[in-house]
Amino acid sequence: MAESTVSISESSTSPFALFTLLGKAGNRFFGTLGGYGNVVWWMLRNARDARTYSRNIFQQMVQIGVDSIPIVIFVSTFVGMVTAVQSAYQLYDWIPRNVVGSLVIKSVLLELTPLLTALVLAGKVGATITAELGTMRVTEQIDALEALAFDPISFLITPRVLAGVVMFPVLIVFGDVVAAIGGLLGSVFVANISPEAFINGMKDSFEVYDAVFGIIKATMFGFMITSIACYQGFHVEGGSEGVGKATMNTVVLTCLAVVVMDFVLASVLL
Amino acid sequence: MIRLENIWKQFSGKQVLRGVSFDVRDKETLVVLGKSGGGKSVLLKMIIGLIKPDSGAIVVDGKDVTKMSYPELRALRFKFGFLFQGAALFDSMTVGENIALSLRRHTGYSNEEITERIEYALSIVGLENVTRVMPSSLSGGMKKRVGLARAIALTPRYVLYDEPTTGLDMETADGINLLINDLRTLLGVTSIVVTHDIHSAFVVGDRFAILDQGVTLMTGTREEIQNSDNEEVRKYINSAIG
Ligand SMILES: Nc1ncnc2c1ncn2[C@@H]1O[C@H](COP(=O)(O)OP(=O)(O)O)[C@@H](O)[C@H]1O
Ligand SMILES: [Mg+2]
């Protein structure tokens, strides 16, 4: 644990104090969990300090949201196409072809777009955040912020997490639309299904709750990916080598967190 | 007035500081001398509460930093300017934005006043026409000057220098040493300079604290440490010069 953040993450009122103690006693797992909890706790407790984080939110929304649009288009198009092609392949000949449209819209909204987009963004957004904050840590820029009487969590972490929570749902709704178009393309050009059949099938099974479920997932994924990545970057130790290690840990941890959260939310909400 | 009393600190089992004590008197420049990895940067960061000692007290203007709440620490940090070893400029911002950041956040200055303040801080460190430059295109010596301009923008009472001349060529280093002395006369600040460069130390320092194996070997004026009978001090001075 980087010692230079003690003044913040050792706040004794935190509900994670027990974990932090276990961490001090040598339990790395609970120590990390406690440290992560402390950062999130601190962020929420200082949510009033908008003056510190508001100026960075827009820039982060651009970096996390707008800059991810190309990769979301790319991934969603292929997700839609492959879902259509595979659905068509799996259906018996006597099943009406518009079922393909139904299958595509269901699986895209509920599972495929949120999950796959989140996994791709775990790499792109998560790695970027950890590398950025990690570099700031090892070059003492985070210490410098604190020395200038800034709260580095409000200044660096809050805007990134807020941008993630806002932009992930936007990206995933956008990805849903692109994936539907991809499904149409795959159906028409590869699986030889008429556009009318596909669109009718899609209309028949579209349910608003499915899209809402995807948005709820996206919000959670956005929160988890950005907060884990920030925590990892914030606590980098050991120079540029440490930044590399932390970046890799972020990609692995956020992917694991996303698949676990995906299952939990499906179990609870469906 | 800053007083360190018997500071201990270990990092994951490694005992870095084992009872460091020294005083810094008002308006003087105290130089902390010691080998690389001896915990000098850690000491400086402790003074503004970035790192907490395992035990010991750090008293700044009568209050113990180690017992301060977070709001008190933030208030304390306004009294300090900190020049980090690599200058620690925010590399996503221009030079001007680096200096403006704390002015915008912590003062009610108008944009014109902020611009004036930036120019003033830069002029003190001997720079002009750099406000729009990105830190990555500055030389090492210029980075330190900008770092110093940023540190003094809010007119601190104390300035902490972490290895201000390390990694600079002789001429640039001399420039920084003169600047440290200028700041002291211009702004009347109390300074702590941490360094392993004994030549620089003698240019800027009034008094010296020698750190060795995690303890303060000796504190005193230049004459006092140069004429010391202490075997360890003599060895340290000779090895540092030689
Ligand atoms: N935040 C930290 N976490 C763990 N170890 C640290 C931390 N800061 C410093 N150290 C260790 O403390 C020792 C002293 O470091 P430092 O104060 O940077 O030495 P100096 O500035 O005298 O060269 C080093 O061994 C360093 O690895
Ligand atoms: Mg150092």
Image (cartoon, coloured by chain):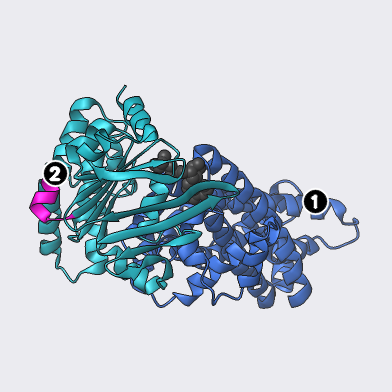
The shade of chain B is cyan
Q: In x, y percent, where is residue A2? A: 52, 53
Q: Which residue, given by chain and number where applicable, does mark 2 sit on?
A: B181
Q: What residue lies at 52% left-to-right and 63% top-to-bottom?
A: A164
Let me know if residue A195 appears in the view: no
**Which quarter of the rendered picture does the N terminus of chain B lie within?**
bottom left
Residue A102 left/right relative to A155: right
> Vertically, is B233 above or below B187?
above
Q: In x, y percent, where is residue A26? A: 68, 56
Name the chain under label 1.
A
Which residue occupies the foreground of this view, B82 or B115?
A: B82
Image disc number at residue A6: none
State the image quarter where residue A51 is shown. bottom left
Let me know if residue B41 appears in the view: yes
Image disc number at residue A86: 1
> Vertically, is B129 above or below B47?
above
Q: At numbered mark 1, what does the secondary structure look like: helix, strand or loop?
A: helix
Which amino acid is tagged 2? Asn
Which residue occupies the foreground of this view, B113 or A259?
A: B113
Please provide the residue range marked out in magenta. B181-189
The shade of chain A is blue
